[in-house]
Amino acid sequence: QVQLVESGGGVVQPGRSLRLSCGASGFTFSDYGMHWVRQAPGKGLEWVAVIWYHGNKKDHGDSVKGRFTISRDNSKNTLYLQMNSLRVEDTAIYYCVRDSMQWSTSGYFDSWGQGILVTVSS
Amino acid sequence: NFMLTQPHSVSESPGRTVTISCTRNTGNIATNYVQWYQQRPGSAPTPVIYENNQRPSGVPFRFSGSVDSSSNSASLSISGLRTEDEADYYCQSFDGVNWVFGGGTTLTVL
């Protein structure tokens, strides 16, 4: 069965960097697009970034564009989110999410990790 | 970017039926599929409806989805309400460029 396990979260000061990782198992990782979705404390869900299955195409939400970078290593079945110039408003639980469609992307997030908390505070 | 608007909260009694709406502000709701996710406190979201009205494996028949172009809205209906249905519910859609979530609706079963 699909398993997504995030790691790398923690407390970081504003302006600093952090890299999240997501280990995938139970499916052919290199066949699926992957996303990061976040949720600020007590707030709703916000899409953050997507990367296509091959890793050659990616996109980021407006609130993180130019600061965050999504990447993947298909040989290690791992998804990453490099977060630079962190702001207090980036404080959130970050979820690693699988796209439902093989070899493309769709509108449907069919599997979610348990999430990892990132706290940006001085 | 388009937006999806949901009621902040709804409540209903056990055994009854509740419907949660999700209204799109620009563009036709029927042009792109709508998904619904359930999030219980302290847990990650899980899908309950995809592609407007499809149920993932394991989701009870009590959950159903629909789309209405006249109101430019999607709806999630839950029949035979149980206390375990208490959760936050989010609608979500993708127009080929942007993945957008509604603000979420808290369902209370009392």
Image (cartoon, helix red, strand yellow):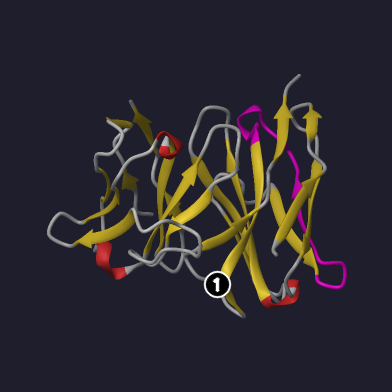
Q: Is residue B18 visible?
A: yes
Q: Chain of mark 1?
A: A
* Residue type at numbered disc 1: Thr
Query: What segment carries the magenta color?
Result: A74-92
Q: Is residue B68 left or right of B62 when viewed as pictured?
A: left
Residue A104, quarter of the rendered image: bottom right
Q: Give the crowd class for mark 1: few <14, some 14-19, many >=20 residues within 10 Å.
A: many
Q: Secondary structure at mark 1?
A: loop
Say which of B97 and B39 sits in front.
B39
Percent across and percent down for residue B90 are 42, 45
Q: What residue is shown at x 26% (from left), y 50% (from top)?
A: B25
Q: Residue drawn 48% across and 37% down?
A: A44
The quadrant holding residue A117 is top right
Residue B27: in sight, yes or no?
no
**Residue A9 placement, left or right of B101:** right
Quarter occupied by residue B20: top left
Rendered location of residue B102, percent (x, y) = 39, 45
Which percent across, then down, holds residue A98? 63, 62
Of B4 and A85, nearer the camera is: B4
Which residue is denoted by mark 1 in the rendering? A105
> Of all residues shown, which one is farthest toward the bottom?
A103
Give residue B13's position: percent from left, percent from top.
Answer: 27, 31
In this view, the residue farthest toward the left is B70
In the rendered image, the quadrant that contains the N terminus of chain B is bottom left
